[in-house]
Amino acid sequence: MTQQLELGLDTFGDVTADEAGQPLPAAQVLRNLVDQGVLADEVGIDFIGFGEHHRDDFAVSAPEVALAAVAARTSRIRLGSAVTVLSSDDPIRVFQRFSTLDAVSNGRAEVILGRGSFTESFPLFGFELSDYERLFEEKLELFAAVRSQEPVSWEGTTRAPLVQQSVYPPVENGLLKTWVGVGGSPESVVRAARYGFPLMLAIIGGEPSRFAPFSDLYRRALAQFELPLQPIGVHSPGHVADTDEEAREQLWPHYQLQMNRIGRERGWSPMGRAHFEQEVAHGSLYVGSPETVAQKIAATARTVGIDRFDLKYGNGQLPHSALMRSIELYGTQVIPRVRELLG
């Protein structure tokens, strides 16, 4: 872990409700998302990421476009995806979109590549779920070649071959910062190390300490591949309010609705309040006052051994006003306190 932990935010652009409890149009959610990114920049947050989905409960299907809108109104915050579903996209176009974002933001772009925890993009873009592993492996290999900014010669089974093909625009300074998002598979951890990409661990349930072995595995794999150390990050959901009680009561109904909706699609049992409280107290929900959330982030940073923590601040239909307050508290109180605790 570096001496100063980077602290970011990310969101899938959940379709939120207005103050009367009615869902907002996706267009308004996207405009609010840009305002949230601007506030994150103003209060000193290091990074903001927008995740890609293609379903009616999330508004973001083109993260780079929304991030470019944030770039135009900000000056320092780093901008990235959370995640880009590489398996159902074209690696060349992904690189081009993010190298363009890097240019218009004066070098602030990053991309987090993943297979995605949802599968709606596969039929939408004409890919077979039976090719899930092969698509990601081949496309990650091609993306790594394109990212090198050298003419690419590549051949695989998922697209036409390339022969000494250059890709434009290049990144202005250095290489595009590229993470690989991992949900808990040792094979995925080793794959990220093989390419020398930073590792982003998505910890969305259970005790964060369960993921400490993945940090150790990743660093050992980098050493075996004779590659330099790379950052390790953690992405986990949460919500910050002025008090612990307010944070829990604000988040609970929206979090329950979201998790039960997704759970019905995946055959999970309904979530009860006791499970929610267990995750807040001991699991991977970072919910509470600034002091409570800061203490928990600092504990995870020490236990897992990380260089960045990204709080997934959008959860279900939690209103825009509550999200803005959460961002404000995270930047002005949580981040300074985490750095004090780790100092």
Image (cartoon, helix red, strand yellow):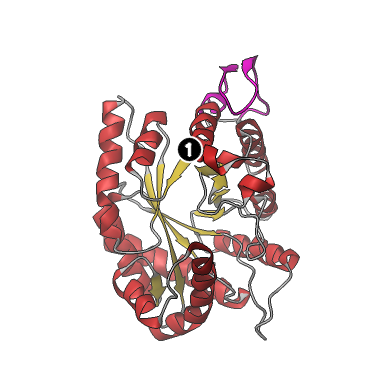
Assess whether residue 271 is covered by the magenta stretch: no
Assess whether residue 164 is covered by the magenta stretch: yes
Q: Quadrant of residue 100?
A: top right
Q: Quadrant of the C terminus?
A: bottom left
Q: Can you see residue 276?
A: yes
Pick the residue in front: 170 or 316. Answer: 316
Query: Looking at the picture, does residue 260 appear above or below residue 120?
Result: below
Point out residue 249 in the picture as x, y percentages from the top left corner. Answer: 46, 84
Q: Quadrant of residue 323?
A: bottom right
Point out residue 160 in the picture as x, y percentages from the top left corner. Answer: 65, 22
Pick the residue in front: 73 or 90. Answer: 90
Q: Which residues are magenta?
A: 144-170
The number of numbered badges drawn on the structure is 1
Pick the residue in front: 263 or 184. Answer: 263
Point out residue 137 in the picture as x, y percentages from the top left corner. Answer: 48, 32
Dot 1, crowdedness within 10 Å: few (<14), some or many (≥20)? few
* Element assignment for label 1: helix
Pick the residue in front: 89 or 266. Answer: 266
Query: Looking at the picture, does residue 147 appear above or below residue 44?
Result: above
For residue 296, side relative to residue 143 (left or right): left
Q: Can you see residue 343?
A: no
Point out residue 138 in the picture as x, y percentages from the top left corner. Answer: 52, 29
Query: Looking at the picture, does residue 324 appear above or below residue 208?
Result: below
Residue ID at (30%, 24%)? 226
Residue ID at (46%, 68%)? 330
Q: According to the image, label 1 marks what residue?
A: 133
- Disc 1 marks a residue whose amino acid type is Glu
Residue ID at (32%, 42%)? 186
